Amino acid sequence: MAPVLQTEFEDKLEMEGFDVLHGPVQVNLGDKQRIQGEIGEGKTTARVGLISHIGGHKFAGNVIIYLPPDLKMGDEPHPLAGCGIWYGRVDPKNVEGIVKETILRGNVVADMFRGGIDAEHKMLRIYPKFET
């Protein structure tokens, strides 16, 4: 599932105008400044990587989206800047919606949301509303 999702995310991100980078991130360990992101010919960059296991079945379709702390939507800070959003049970047919809703609009897709971290590294959860 992972290689299929990787290809789908790369395709959908490129369709939305992202410069999709490949290979490892080059980090200068002598530089004391915090890494803000990479600049690629005036486009916002993205990188899609694979991980070995974060829980669930190997075909569970787990996806973690990390949004840079300095990410903007126009002139305003992105609502999810600095967050890591974890989705589960993601199929290739869901990728376009995830890119549009989470990355471009700053919305969490509740039915696939499994958890996350905010910009202060605190856990994010969606709690159901109980009516009394």
Image: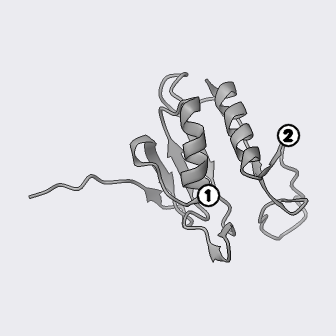
For numbered disc 1, what is the local secondary structure? Answer: helix
Q: Residue at x 63, y 53 (%)?
A: 66
Amino acid type shown at disc 2: Gly
The residue labelled by disc 1 is 104
Q: Which mark is residue 115?
A: none
- Colouring rule applied to residues: one colour
Q: Is residue 122 above or below residue 96?
A: below
Amino acid type shown at disc 1: Leu
Measuring from the top left, give residue 95's x and y in whole percent. 59, 39
Q: Which mark is residue 23?
A: 2
For numbered disc 2, what is the local secondary structure? Answer: loop
Q: Nearer the viewer, residue 79 or 55?
A: 79
Q: Residue furthest front?
A: 15
Q: Answer few, some or many: residues within 10 Å of disc 2's Cα (few below 14, many 20 plus, some between 14 and 19).
A: few
First in residue order: circle 2 vs circle 1: 2
Q: How many marks?
A: 2
Measuring from the top left, give residue 126's x and y in whole percent. 36, 53
Measuring from the top left, give residue 119's x and y in whole percent. 57, 65
Measuring from the top left, give residue 5's x and y in whole percent. 64, 31
CA gap between label 2 and label 1 equals 24 Å
Q: Answer few, some or many: residues within 10 Å of disc 1's Cα (few below 14, many 20 plus, some between 14 and 19).
A: some
Q: Residue at x 62, y 57 (%)?
A: 104
Q: Residue furthest bottom?
A: 75
Q: Is residue 79 above or below residue 100?
A: below
Q: Residue at x 82, y 71 (%)?
A: 33
